[in-house]
Amino acid sequence: MIELLRQIDHRLFHFMNTDMANPVLDVVCPVLRNKLTWLPLYLLIAFLFYRRVGHKIILLGILAAITILLSDQISSSLIKPFIHRARPCNNPAIHARLVIEYCGAGYSFVSSHAANHFGIAAFLSVFVNRKGICVPLLFVWAFLVSVSQIYVGVHFPIDVTAGALLGTAIGFSVALFGRKYVAPASAKN
């Protein structure tokens, strides 16, 4: 069973990293995974939440930072050193196509990018107005960032999937804890 999962993971990686290769995605995917690309979105989200919760934005920001801290440290300081899975771009047997300049010296499982982005998406989804399209957009954003990790050659699909699940669990947990201290956005209308 483990061998079958590994084969599926490698085939899916090669499909996304090599078979889907094209000049447009070669430009778009590195941009999607760059945290500076999303700075305007982060500022917009902070502004919109400030309008909804006022001074409680500080507590919301602290809780969001705790979400990122937990998802990042659990993925990179606990799970990665324990599993020791080499990144596809650091494994010559994989023949990964590296689209970015640097592969990264760390391990692959789980993807910290996926954990962090799905964590913050899950966290924010608890506090946004659920009548709109905001919640699906948060998860589409996290998905695009995560899939770009596979395309550029630094993670396998299972790394991204596990990171997404980890981040989502952490994000929802922190948000449900913090919800009693920060009124949901929909309750402020």
Image (cartoon, rainbow, N blue to C red):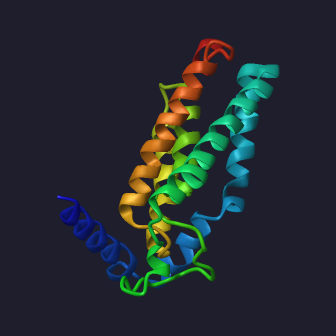
Q: Is residue 134 left or right of residue 61?
A: left
Quarter placement of the N terminus? bottom left
Image coordinates for residue 96, horizontal then vertical, percent = 42, 83
Q: Is residue 127 visible?
A: no
**Residue toward you, 16 or 131:** 16
Residue at 60% in and 74% down: 105
Image coordinates for residue 99, horizontal then vertical, percent = 53, 81
Relative to 50, is 188 above or below? above
Residue at 58% in and 48% down: 116
Quarter placement of the C terminus? top right
**Residue toward you, 29 or 134:** 29
Relative to 44, is 53 above or below? above
Image coordinates for residue 71, horizontal then vertical, percent = 58, 44
Relative to 137, is 132 above or below? above
Image coordinates for residue 184, horizontal then vertical, percent = 61, 18
Q: Quadrant of residue 103?
A: bottom right
Q: Is residue 102 left or right of residue 11?
A: right
Residue at 62% in and 40% down: 70
Residue at 26% in and 73% down: 11
The image shows a total of numbered marks equal to 0
Q: Is residue 41 visible?
A: yes
